[in-house]
Image (cartoon, coloured by chain):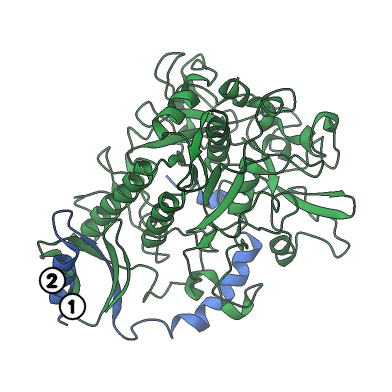
Chain colours: A green, B blue
Amino acid sequence: MVIAENRAVGLATVRSANPQFLASANSEAALVGAARNRPVGFAPTDSQPPRYDVEREEGIAAGRAQGGASGAAAGDALSGLQWDMRQIRATVDGSYSVQRGSHDVRVGIIDTGIDGSHPDLARNFSERLSRNFTHDIPLIDGSCREEPDRSCSDPPDVDEGGHGTHVAGIVGAELNGLGTAGVAPDVRLVNLRAGQDSGWFFLQQTVNALTYAGDIGIDVVNMSFFTDPWLYNCRDNPADSPEAQREQQVIIAATQRALEYAHAHDVTLVSSSGNQFTDLGRPTEDDISPDFPPGAEYHRDVDNSCLTMPTEGRHVIVVNATGPTERKAFYSNYGREQSNVAAPGGDSREFFGTPQYRTVDNLVLSAYPEDLLREEGLIRPDGTPAIPDVVRSCSQGVCGYYAYLQGTSMASPHAAGVAALIVSQYGTADPRHAGVTLAPQEVRRRLEQTSDEHACPRPRLLNYQGLGPIFNAFCAGTKAFNGFYGHGIVNAARAVA
Amino acid sequence: MRIRHLFVVPALFVLIAGSLASRAAGTAGARGSTYLVLYDDAATREEARAAVSEAAGW
Protein backbone atom coordinates (compact mmCIF):
# COMPACT_ATOMS: atom_id res chain seq x y z
CA MET A 1 0.00 0.00 0.00
CA VAL A 2 1.05 3.60 -0.60
CA ILE A 3 1.24 5.17 2.85
CA ALA A 4 2.10 8.70 1.77
CA GLU A 5 2.86 10.54 -1.43
CA ASN A 6 4.48 13.89 -2.13
CA ARG A 7 3.11 14.71 -5.57
CA ALA A 8 5.25 17.81 -6.04
CA VAL A 9 8.39 15.71 -5.91
CA GLY A 10 7.00 12.32 -6.93
CA LEU A 11 8.15 10.60 -3.76
CA ALA A 12 6.00 7.88 -2.23
CA THR A 13 6.27 5.88 0.94
CA VAL A 14 5.23 2.32 0.25
CA ARG A 15 4.72 -0.69 2.48
CA SER A 16 5.30 -4.08 0.92
CA ALA A 17 5.77 -7.63 2.15
CA ASN A 18 7.51 -8.60 -1.09
CA PRO A 19 11.12 -9.39 -0.14
CA GLN A 20 12.16 -8.62 -3.72
CA PHE A 21 10.51 -5.21 -3.73
CA LEU A 22 13.71 -3.19 -4.03
CA ALA A 23 15.05 -5.15 -6.97
CA SER A 24 11.68 -5.12 -8.69
CA ALA A 25 11.08 -1.41 -8.19
CA ASN A 26 14.59 -0.53 -9.33
CA SER A 27 13.95 -2.29 -12.62
CA GLU A 28 10.73 -0.37 -13.36
CA ALA A 29 11.11 2.26 -16.09
CA ALA A 30 8.53 4.54 -14.48
CA LEU A 31 10.57 4.76 -11.28
CA VAL A 32 13.92 6.40 -10.65
CA GLY A 33 14.46 3.95 -7.85
CA ALA A 34 13.48 2.76 -4.44
CA ALA A 35 15.23 2.79 -1.12
CA ARG A 36 14.53 1.21 2.19
CA ASN A 37 12.78 3.66 4.47
CA ARG A 38 15.49 3.84 7.05
CA PRO A 39 13.64 4.78 10.20
CA VAL A 40 11.41 1.72 10.21
CA GLY A 41 12.32 -1.88 10.79
CA PHE A 42 15.88 -1.55 11.99
CA ALA A 43 17.11 -2.38 15.44
CA PRO A 44 20.00 -0.31 16.77
CA THR A 45 23.14 -1.91 18.10
CA ASP A 46 23.43 -0.50 21.59
CA SER A 47 23.56 3.18 22.37
CA GLN A 48 23.12 6.24 20.21
CA PRO A 49 25.85 8.69 19.27
CA PRO A 50 25.31 12.37 19.92
CA ARG A 51 24.09 14.37 16.96
CA TYR A 52 25.12 17.84 17.98
CA ASP A 53 28.74 17.03 18.40
CA VAL A 54 30.43 20.28 17.55
CA GLU A 55 27.71 22.38 19.05
CA ARG A 56 28.23 20.99 22.52
CA GLU A 57 31.91 20.67 23.05
CA GLU A 58 33.12 19.14 26.26
CA GLY A 59 35.09 21.19 28.72
CA ILE A 60 33.93 24.68 27.82
CA ALA A 61 34.40 27.05 30.74
CA ALA A 62 32.49 30.07 31.92
CA GLY A 63 33.47 33.32 30.28
CA ARG A 64 34.22 36.71 31.74
CA ALA A 65 30.86 38.15 30.74
CA GLN A 66 28.84 35.28 32.18
CA GLY A 67 25.86 36.34 34.22
CA GLY A 68 26.17 39.96 33.27
CA ALA A 69 24.26 42.09 30.89
CA SER A 70 26.98 44.39 29.71
CA GLY A 71 26.25 46.63 26.80
CA ALA A 72 22.52 46.17 27.19
CA ALA A 73 21.65 49.85 27.09
CA ALA A 74 21.25 49.80 23.34
CA GLY A 75 19.61 46.44 22.93
CA ASP A 76 18.22 43.48 24.84
CA ALA A 77 19.29 42.37 28.31
CA LEU A 78 21.86 39.93 26.95
CA SER A 79 22.94 41.93 23.90
CA GLY A 80 26.31 42.47 25.50
CA LEU A 81 26.99 38.78 25.08
CA GLN A 82 26.02 38.77 21.41
CA TRP A 83 29.35 39.32 19.66
CA ASP A 84 27.79 37.55 16.70
CA MET A 85 25.22 40.29 16.10
CA ARG A 86 27.89 42.96 16.40
CA GLN A 87 30.02 41.12 13.84
CA ILE A 88 27.24 41.32 11.25
CA ARG A 89 25.95 44.74 12.45
CA ALA A 90 22.52 43.50 13.46
CA THR A 91 22.42 46.06 16.25
CA VAL A 92 20.45 49.08 17.35
CA ASP A 93 22.84 51.44 15.60
CA GLY A 94 23.13 49.05 12.65
CA SER A 95 20.33 47.25 10.82
CA TYR A 96 17.74 47.60 13.61
CA SER A 97 17.57 51.34 12.98
CA VAL A 98 16.54 50.71 9.36
CA GLN A 99 14.85 47.34 9.16
CA ARG A 100 13.90 44.76 11.80
CA GLY A 101 11.99 42.47 9.50
CA SER A 102 8.29 42.20 8.87
CA HIS A 103 5.60 39.86 10.08
CA ASP A 104 4.65 39.60 6.41
CA VAL A 105 8.00 37.90 5.74
CA ARG A 106 8.11 34.26 6.70
CA VAL A 107 11.22 32.35 7.63
CA GLY A 108 10.85 28.59 7.73
CA ILE A 109 13.08 26.77 10.18
CA ILE A 110 13.61 23.22 8.91
CA ASP A 111 14.96 21.74 12.09
CA THR A 112 14.02 19.86 15.28
CA GLY A 113 11.13 22.22 16.00
CA ILE A 114 10.58 25.60 17.65
CA ASP A 115 9.51 26.18 21.23
CA GLY A 116 6.63 28.53 20.44
CA SER A 117 6.17 29.35 24.10
CA HIS A 118 9.66 30.77 24.54
CA PRO A 119 9.12 34.35 25.72
CA ASP A 120 11.62 35.71 23.21
CA LEU A 121 9.99 33.94 20.24
CA ALA A 122 6.29 33.70 21.03
CA ARG A 123 5.21 36.96 19.39
CA ASN A 124 6.99 36.12 16.14
CA PHE A 125 6.03 32.45 16.04
CA SER A 126 3.25 31.39 13.66
CA GLU A 127 1.46 28.37 15.07
CA ARG A 128 -1.05 28.53 12.22
CA LEU A 129 1.54 27.97 9.51
CA SER A 130 3.85 25.67 11.45
CA ARG A 131 3.89 21.95 10.78
CA ASN A 132 5.60 18.89 12.19
CA PHE A 133 6.44 16.45 9.40
CA THR A 134 7.95 13.90 11.76
CA HIS A 135 6.67 11.29 14.12
CA ASP A 136 8.89 10.34 17.03
CA ILE A 137 10.63 7.02 16.54
CA PRO A 138 11.17 5.20 19.84
CA LEU A 139 14.24 3.48 18.44
CA ILE A 140 16.10 6.75 18.23
CA ASP A 141 13.95 9.31 20.03
CA GLY A 142 13.19 7.32 23.17
CA SER A 143 10.06 5.92 24.66
CA CYS A 144 6.95 7.95 23.91
CA ARG A 145 5.91 7.56 27.54
CA GLU A 146 9.10 9.31 28.57
CA GLU A 147 8.57 12.23 26.23
CA PRO A 148 7.87 15.54 28.00
CA ASP A 149 4.37 15.47 26.49
CA ARG A 150 4.12 11.65 26.74
CA SER A 151 3.37 11.53 23.05
CA CYS A 152 5.15 10.55 19.85
CA SER A 153 3.06 13.08 17.92
CA ASP A 154 4.47 16.42 18.90
CA PRO A 155 2.47 19.56 18.20
CA PRO A 156 4.12 22.15 15.95
CA ASP A 157 5.02 24.50 18.78
CA VAL A 158 7.42 22.28 20.69
CA ASP A 159 11.09 21.47 20.28
CA GLU A 160 12.31 18.46 22.16
CA GLY A 161 15.73 18.62 20.56
CA GLY A 162 16.66 22.25 21.32
CA HIS A 163 18.60 22.83 18.13
CA GLY A 164 15.70 24.35 16.19
CA THR A 165 14.78 26.84 18.91
CA HIS A 166 18.39 28.03 19.07
CA VAL A 167 18.45 28.49 15.29
CA ALA A 168 15.08 30.29 15.34
CA GLY A 169 16.33 32.67 18.03
CA ILE A 170 19.31 33.66 15.91
CA VAL A 171 16.99 34.49 13.03
CA GLY A 172 14.22 36.25 14.88
CA ALA A 173 14.31 36.53 18.69
CA GLU A 174 12.38 39.65 19.61
CA LEU A 175 13.93 42.99 20.47
CA ASN A 176 11.94 43.34 23.65
CA GLY A 177 14.36 43.97 26.47
CA LEU A 178 14.45 40.29 27.42
CA GLY A 179 17.32 37.95 26.65
CA THR A 180 18.80 38.09 23.18
CA ALA A 181 17.69 39.66 19.90
CA GLY A 182 17.82 38.00 16.51
CA VAL A 183 18.99 39.32 13.17
CA ALA A 184 15.41 40.11 12.15
CA PRO A 185 13.54 40.63 15.43
CA ASP A 186 10.18 41.40 13.81
CA VAL A 187 10.11 38.60 11.25
CA ARG A 188 7.58 35.76 11.22
CA LEU A 189 9.02 32.39 12.33
CA VAL A 190 7.50 29.18 10.99
CA ASN A 191 8.40 25.75 12.32
CA LEU A 192 8.87 23.28 9.46
CA ARG A 193 9.94 20.41 11.58
CA ALA A 194 11.76 17.67 9.67
CA GLY A 195 14.24 16.64 12.34
CA GLN A 196 13.72 13.91 14.88
CA ASP A 197 14.17 14.82 18.54
CA SER A 198 17.45 12.97 18.38
CA GLY A 199 18.68 15.06 15.45
CA TRP A 200 18.27 12.74 12.48
CA PHE A 201 16.81 14.28 9.32
CA PHE A 202 15.31 11.71 6.98
CA LEU A 203 14.48 12.12 3.34
CA GLN A 204 10.72 12.18 3.22
CA GLN A 205 10.35 14.67 6.06
CA THR A 206 12.87 17.09 4.58
CA VAL A 207 11.29 16.84 1.15
CA ASN A 208 7.84 17.45 2.61
CA ALA A 209 9.08 20.48 4.54
CA LEU A 210 10.58 22.02 1.41
CA THR A 211 7.53 21.58 -0.79
CA TYR A 212 5.24 22.83 1.97
CA ALA A 213 7.46 25.91 2.26
CA GLY A 214 6.85 26.56 -1.42
CA ASP A 215 3.13 26.02 -1.10
CA ILE A 216 2.49 28.45 1.77
CA GLY A 217 4.65 31.37 0.69
CA ILE A 218 7.70 30.92 2.90
CA ASP A 219 10.29 33.52 1.87
CA VAL A 220 13.44 32.03 3.37
CA VAL A 221 14.22 28.61 4.79
CA ASN A 222 17.14 27.76 7.01
CA MET A 223 18.60 24.27 6.71
CA SER A 224 21.20 23.53 9.37
CA PHE A 225 21.43 19.81 8.72
CA PHE A 226 22.39 17.16 6.23
CA THR A 227 19.92 14.55 5.11
CA ASP A 228 20.64 11.22 6.77
CA PRO A 229 21.92 8.60 6.63
CA TRP A 230 24.71 9.57 4.19
CA LEU A 231 27.05 12.49 4.87
CA TYR A 232 28.15 12.15 1.24
CA ASN A 233 25.72 10.68 -1.25
CA CYS A 234 27.63 8.82 -3.95
CA ARG A 235 25.86 7.50 -7.04
CA ASP A 236 28.25 4.66 -7.79
CA ASN A 237 30.84 4.26 -5.05
CA PRO A 238 32.34 0.76 -5.35
CA ALA A 239 32.41 0.48 -1.57
CA ASP A 240 28.60 0.59 -1.51
CA SER A 241 26.19 -2.21 -2.32
CA PRO A 242 23.92 -1.74 -5.35
CA GLU A 243 21.06 -1.13 -2.91
CA ALA A 244 23.04 1.54 -1.08
CA GLN A 245 24.02 3.18 -4.35
CA ARG A 246 20.39 3.34 -5.42
CA GLU A 247 19.40 4.79 -2.08
CA GLN A 248 21.91 7.60 -2.46
CA GLN A 249 20.74 8.26 -6.02
CA VAL A 250 17.20 8.59 -4.72
CA ILE A 251 18.27 10.98 -1.96
CA ILE A 252 20.13 13.23 -4.41
CA ALA A 253 17.32 13.26 -6.97
CA ALA A 254 14.43 13.67 -4.53
CA THR A 255 16.15 16.41 -2.55
CA GLN A 256 17.06 18.28 -5.70
CA ARG A 257 13.49 18.10 -6.95
CA ALA A 258 12.25 19.51 -3.65
CA LEU A 259 14.83 22.30 -3.77
CA GLU A 260 13.81 23.13 -7.34
CA TYR A 261 10.16 23.21 -6.31
CA ALA A 262 10.81 25.55 -3.40
CA HIS A 263 13.08 27.79 -5.46
CA ALA A 264 10.47 28.01 -8.22
CA HIS A 265 8.01 29.16 -5.54
CA ASP A 266 10.34 32.00 -4.49
CA VAL A 267 11.80 30.38 -1.41
CA THR A 268 15.37 31.51 -0.72
CA LEU A 269 17.31 28.45 0.41
CA VAL A 270 20.05 28.87 3.02
CA SER A 271 22.14 26.03 4.42
CA SER A 272 25.11 25.45 6.69
CA SER A 273 28.26 24.12 5.03
CA GLY A 274 28.86 21.42 7.64
CA ASN A 275 31.18 20.77 10.56
CA GLN A 276 33.65 18.30 9.08
CA PHE A 277 36.44 20.90 8.51
CA THR A 278 36.56 19.71 4.92
CA ASP A 279 37.03 21.47 1.59
CA LEU A 280 33.68 20.52 0.05
CA GLY A 281 35.27 20.62 -3.38
CA ARG A 282 37.78 17.97 -2.33
CA PRO A 283 36.25 15.46 0.04
CA THR A 284 38.39 12.37 0.43
CA GLU A 285 36.76 10.06 2.91
CA ASP A 286 33.58 9.42 4.81
CA ASP A 287 33.57 7.06 7.75
CA ILE A 288 30.40 8.18 9.51
CA SER A 289 27.95 6.93 6.84
CA PRO A 290 25.47 5.42 6.84
CA ASP A 291 24.81 6.88 10.27
CA PHE A 292 21.55 5.01 10.63
CA PRO A 293 21.04 2.50 12.04
CA PRO A 294 23.81 3.24 14.52
CA GLY A 295 26.80 1.02 14.00
CA ALA A 296 26.22 0.59 10.26
CA GLU A 297 28.88 3.07 9.19
CA TYR A 298 31.92 1.97 7.23
CA HIS A 299 34.89 3.64 5.63
CA ARG A 300 34.49 4.94 2.11
CA ASP A 301 36.86 6.85 -0.08
CA VAL A 302 34.79 9.61 -1.63
CA ASP A 303 35.40 12.24 -4.28
CA ASN A 304 33.78 15.43 -5.47
CA SER A 305 31.06 13.54 -7.31
CA CYS A 306 29.61 12.67 -3.90
CA LEU A 307 27.23 15.26 -2.50
CA THR A 308 26.14 16.39 0.94
CA MET A 309 22.46 17.23 0.65
CA PRO A 310 20.86 19.73 0.76
CA THR A 311 24.08 21.76 1.16
CA GLU A 312 25.38 20.87 -2.30
CA GLY A 313 22.04 21.08 -4.04
CA ARG A 314 21.33 23.70 -6.68
CA HIS A 315 20.02 27.14 -5.62
CA VAL A 316 21.29 26.72 -2.06
CA ILE A 317 23.21 29.57 -0.39
CA VAL A 318 25.96 27.88 1.62
CA VAL A 319 27.27 29.50 4.79
CA ASN A 320 30.63 28.91 6.49
CA ALA A 321 31.21 29.72 10.16
CA THR A 322 33.41 32.37 11.76
CA GLY A 323 34.51 32.93 15.33
CA PRO A 324 34.62 36.19 17.32
CA THR A 325 37.79 37.43 15.56
CA GLU A 326 36.33 36.58 12.12
CA ARG A 327 38.71 33.63 11.72
CA LYS A 328 37.15 30.65 9.94
CA ALA A 329 35.89 28.42 12.74
CA PHE A 330 38.04 25.33 13.26
CA TYR A 331 35.22 22.92 12.43
CA SER A 332 33.70 24.77 9.48
CA ASN A 333 33.70 23.26 6.02
CA TYR A 334 35.00 25.53 3.30
CA GLY A 335 36.11 25.64 -0.32
CA ARG A 336 35.51 27.85 -3.33
CA GLU A 337 33.15 25.41 -5.00
CA GLN A 338 30.38 25.63 -2.41
CA SER A 339 30.98 28.61 -0.13
CA ASN A 340 28.77 31.62 -0.78
CA VAL A 341 29.09 33.69 2.40
CA ALA A 342 30.31 33.39 5.98
CA ALA A 343 28.61 34.26 9.25
CA PRO A 344 29.23 33.84 12.98
CA GLY A 345 29.01 30.27 14.20
CA GLY A 346 31.31 30.47 17.20
CA ASP A 347 34.74 28.98 17.76
CA SER A 348 35.72 27.68 21.16
CA ARG A 349 39.32 27.41 19.96
CA GLU A 350 39.93 31.09 19.36
CA PHE A 351 42.19 33.09 21.71
CA PHE A 352 44.61 30.22 22.24
CA GLY A 353 46.91 30.92 25.15
CA THR A 354 44.55 33.42 26.75
CA PRO A 355 41.87 33.04 29.45
CA GLN A 356 39.20 33.26 26.74
CA TYR A 357 40.34 30.04 25.04
CA ARG A 358 37.62 27.39 25.30
CA THR A 359 35.13 29.60 27.09
CA VAL A 360 31.48 30.25 26.31
CA ASP A 361 32.41 33.80 25.34
CA ASN A 362 33.44 32.37 21.96
CA LEU A 363 30.12 30.65 21.30
CA VAL A 364 26.75 31.86 20.05
CA LEU A 365 24.07 32.59 22.64
CA SER A 366 20.45 32.05 21.65
CA ALA A 367 17.07 30.90 22.89
CA TYR A 368 16.61 27.37 24.26
CA PRO A 369 13.57 25.44 25.51
CA GLU A 370 13.18 25.58 29.28
CA ASP A 371 11.48 22.17 29.43
CA LEU A 372 14.41 20.52 27.74
CA LEU A 373 16.95 22.14 30.06
CA ARG A 374 14.94 20.99 33.08
CA GLU A 375 14.74 17.47 31.71
CA GLU A 376 18.49 17.45 31.18
CA GLY A 377 19.05 18.69 34.73
CA LEU A 378 20.67 21.87 33.53
CA ILE A 379 18.45 24.14 35.62
CA ARG A 380 18.47 24.02 39.41
CA PRO A 381 15.19 23.75 41.34
CA ASP A 382 15.33 27.49 42.04
CA GLY A 383 15.46 28.20 38.32
CA THR A 384 19.09 29.26 38.10
CA PRO A 385 21.28 27.65 35.42
CA ALA A 386 23.45 24.76 36.58
CA ILE A 387 26.17 25.10 33.93
CA PRO A 388 27.93 28.06 32.28
CA ASP A 389 26.50 27.11 28.87
CA VAL A 390 23.04 28.22 30.01
CA VAL A 391 21.88 31.76 30.83
CA ARG A 392 18.57 32.95 32.28
CA SER A 393 17.09 36.35 31.57
CA CYS A 394 14.06 37.75 33.39
CA SER A 395 12.02 40.85 32.78
CA GLN A 396 8.76 41.92 34.43
CA GLY A 397 8.25 38.50 35.98
CA VAL A 398 8.90 36.57 32.77
CA CYS A 399 12.05 34.47 32.38
CA GLY A 400 13.58 32.92 29.30
CA TYR A 401 16.51 30.55 28.93
CA TYR A 402 19.41 30.74 26.52
CA ALA A 403 22.25 28.40 25.61
CA TYR A 404 25.70 28.79 24.13
CA LEU A 405 26.31 26.60 21.08
CA GLN A 406 28.70 26.62 18.14
CA GLY A 407 28.58 25.21 14.65
CA THR A 408 27.81 26.02 11.05
CA SER A 409 24.26 25.32 12.26
CA MET A 410 24.53 28.68 14.03
CA ALA A 411 26.18 30.47 11.08
CA SER A 412 23.46 29.66 8.58
CA PRO A 413 20.59 31.36 10.47
CA HIS A 414 22.58 34.59 10.66
CA ALA A 415 22.62 34.62 6.85
CA ALA A 416 18.98 33.50 6.69
CA GLY A 417 18.09 36.40 8.99
CA VAL A 418 19.86 38.87 6.72
CA ALA A 419 18.05 37.33 3.75
CA ALA A 420 14.77 37.93 5.60
CA LEU A 421 15.74 41.56 6.16
CA ILE A 422 16.40 41.91 2.42
CA VAL A 423 12.96 40.52 1.59
CA SER A 424 11.42 42.85 4.19
CA GLN A 425 13.22 45.87 2.75
CA TYR A 426 12.93 45.22 -0.98
CA GLY A 427 10.10 42.71 -1.40
CA THR A 428 6.79 43.36 -3.09
CA ALA A 429 3.29 42.35 -2.13
CA ASP A 430 2.46 38.68 -2.49
CA PRO A 431 -1.35 38.66 -2.70
CA ARG A 432 -1.46 34.89 -3.16
CA HIS A 433 -0.10 34.34 0.33
CA ALA A 434 -1.01 37.69 1.90
CA GLY A 435 2.63 38.47 2.46
CA VAL A 436 5.74 39.84 0.80
CA THR A 437 7.94 38.18 -1.80
CA LEU A 438 11.28 38.69 -3.52
CA ALA A 439 12.90 36.44 -6.11
CA PRO A 440 15.59 34.22 -4.57
CA GLN A 441 18.08 35.32 -7.23
CA GLU A 442 17.65 38.92 -6.10
CA VAL A 443 17.95 37.98 -2.43
CA ARG A 444 21.16 36.09 -3.13
CA ARG A 445 22.59 38.94 -5.19
CA ARG A 446 21.98 41.49 -2.45
CA LEU A 447 23.18 39.15 0.31
CA GLU A 448 26.45 38.45 -1.47
CA GLN A 449 27.06 42.00 -2.73
CA THR A 450 26.55 43.57 0.67
CA SER A 451 28.72 41.10 2.56
CA ASP A 452 32.02 42.39 3.92
CA GLU A 453 34.83 41.04 1.79
CA HIS A 454 37.41 39.21 3.85
CA ALA A 455 40.84 38.23 2.60
CA CYS A 456 42.40 34.83 3.20
CA PRO A 457 44.70 34.60 6.22
CA ARG A 458 48.47 34.93 5.78
CA PRO A 459 49.84 32.36 5.37
CA ARG A 460 46.95 30.82 3.49
CA LEU A 461 47.37 27.47 5.23
CA LEU A 462 45.58 28.10 8.52
CA ASN A 463 47.04 26.17 11.42
CA TYR A 464 44.77 26.19 14.45
CA GLN A 465 46.92 26.44 17.56
CA GLY A 466 45.99 23.83 20.10
CA LEU A 467 44.51 21.49 17.49
CA GLY A 468 46.14 18.82 15.36
CA PRO A 469 47.19 19.14 11.73
CA ILE A 470 44.02 17.45 10.47
CA PHE A 471 42.27 20.75 11.15
CA ASN A 472 44.65 22.69 8.91
CA ALA A 473 42.78 24.41 6.11
CA PHE A 474 44.05 26.11 2.95
CA CYS A 475 42.25 29.24 1.83
CA ALA A 476 42.18 29.64 -1.94
CA GLY A 477 40.92 32.68 -3.79
CA THR A 478 40.92 36.45 -3.69
CA LYS A 479 39.70 38.97 -1.15
CA ALA A 480 36.55 39.38 -3.23
CA PHE A 481 35.83 35.65 -3.23
CA ASN A 482 37.61 32.82 -1.47
CA GLY A 483 37.03 29.41 0.04
CA PHE A 484 36.83 30.55 3.66
CA TYR A 485 34.46 33.50 3.36
CA GLY A 486 32.89 33.20 -0.08
CA HIS A 487 31.79 36.71 -0.98
CA GLY A 488 32.36 37.82 2.60
CA ILE A 489 30.81 37.94 6.06
CA VAL A 490 27.15 38.90 5.85
CA ASN A 491 26.37 42.47 6.90
CA ALA A 492 22.82 43.17 8.02
CA ALA A 493 23.22 46.96 8.02
CA ARG A 494 24.64 47.13 4.50
CA ALA A 495 22.02 44.69 3.25
CA VAL A 496 19.21 47.12 4.06
CA ALA A 497 21.01 50.45 3.65
CA MET B 1 37.77 11.88 9.97
CA ARG B 2 35.66 11.77 13.06
CA ILE B 3 35.22 14.64 15.41
CA ARG B 4 32.33 13.07 17.21
CA HIS B 5 34.40 11.44 19.92
CA LEU B 6 35.60 14.83 21.14
CA PHE B 7 32.20 15.95 22.24
CA VAL B 8 29.96 15.35 25.18
CA VAL B 9 26.91 13.12 25.09
CA PRO B 10 23.89 15.26 25.93
CA ALA B 11 22.08 14.13 29.04
CA LEU B 12 18.97 13.50 26.99
CA PHE B 13 20.80 10.83 25.10
CA VAL B 14 21.48 8.86 28.25
CA LEU B 15 17.76 8.75 28.78
CA ILE B 16 17.16 7.64 25.21
CA ALA B 17 19.79 4.93 25.24
CA GLY B 18 18.28 3.39 28.33
CA SER B 19 14.94 2.95 26.65
CA LEU B 20 16.20 1.45 23.44
CA ALA B 21 16.63 -2.19 24.27
CA SER B 22 13.10 -2.68 25.47
CA ARG B 23 11.59 -1.02 22.42
CA ALA B 24 13.75 -2.37 19.64
CA ALA B 25 12.56 -5.95 19.59
CA GLY B 26 8.98 -5.08 18.94
CA THR B 27 9.51 -2.83 15.95
CA ALA B 28 11.35 -4.87 13.39
CA GLY B 29 9.74 -6.93 10.75
CA ALA B 30 6.03 -6.55 11.38
CA ARG B 31 3.71 -6.17 8.35
CA GLY B 32 6.52 -6.02 5.82
CA SER B 33 8.90 -3.16 5.27
CA THR B 34 8.43 0.40 4.11
CA TYR B 35 10.26 1.93 1.18
CA LEU B 36 10.71 5.31 -0.40
CA VAL B 37 9.98 5.27 -4.11
CA LEU B 38 10.90 8.12 -6.45
CA TYR B 39 8.82 8.41 -9.59
CA ASP B 40 10.50 9.04 -12.93
CA ASP B 41 10.07 12.57 -14.28
CA ALA B 42 8.85 11.26 -17.61
CA ALA B 43 6.18 9.00 -16.14
CA THR B 44 2.66 10.04 -15.27
CA ARG B 45 1.54 9.53 -11.69
CA GLU B 46 -0.70 6.69 -12.83
CA GLU B 47 2.18 4.98 -14.62
CA ALA B 48 4.40 5.35 -11.59
CA ARG B 49 1.79 4.01 -9.20
CA ALA B 50 1.15 1.08 -11.52
CA ALA B 51 4.89 0.36 -11.47
CA VAL B 52 4.87 0.44 -7.68
CA SER B 53 1.97 -2.02 -7.64
CA GLU B 54 3.81 -4.27 -10.05
CA ALA B 55 6.98 -4.23 -7.94
CA ALA B 56 5.05 -4.85 -4.74
CA GLY B 57 3.11 -7.70 -6.27
CA TRP B 58 -0.26 -6.19 -5.38
- Locate residue B37: give its quadrant: bottom left
Labelled pair 1, 2 in contact (Cβ < 8 Å): yes
Q: Looking at the picture, how far across and down is residue A138, in whole percent?
A: 51, 75
Q: Position of residue A91 (x, y in %)?
A: 71, 28
Q: Nearer the viewer, residue A492 or A433?
A: A433
Q: Name the side, left or right, on which A175 lies relative to A298.
A: right
Image quadrant in which the C terminus of chain B is located: bottom left
Seen at 75% across and 27% down, the residue is: A92
Image point (49%, 26%), residue name:
A447
- Tell me how far mark 1 sits from mark 2, CA to CA: 8 Å
Per the image, the residue denoted by label 1 is: B56
- The residue positioned 73% from the left and 27% from the top of the image is A354
Task: Please rate how many residues cluster around mark 2, counting C-alpha atoms within 10 Å: few if below 14, some from 14 to 19, many from 20.
Answer: some
Residue that carries the numbered disc 2 in the rendered image: A24
Residue A112 location (% of width, % of height): 55, 58
Q: Considering depth in this image, is A54 or A163 the residue closer to the camera?
A: A163
Depth check: A52 or A238 in front? A52
Q: Chain of mark 2?
A: A
Q: Is residue A405 visible?
A: no
The three-letter code of the residue at mark 1 reads Ala
Where A293 falls versus A235 (above or below)? Answer: below
In the image, B14 versus B27, the foreground residue is B27
Relative vertical location of residue A39 with respect to residue A353 in this rendering, above or below? below
Task: Name the side, left or right, on which A149 lies relative to A300.
Answer: right
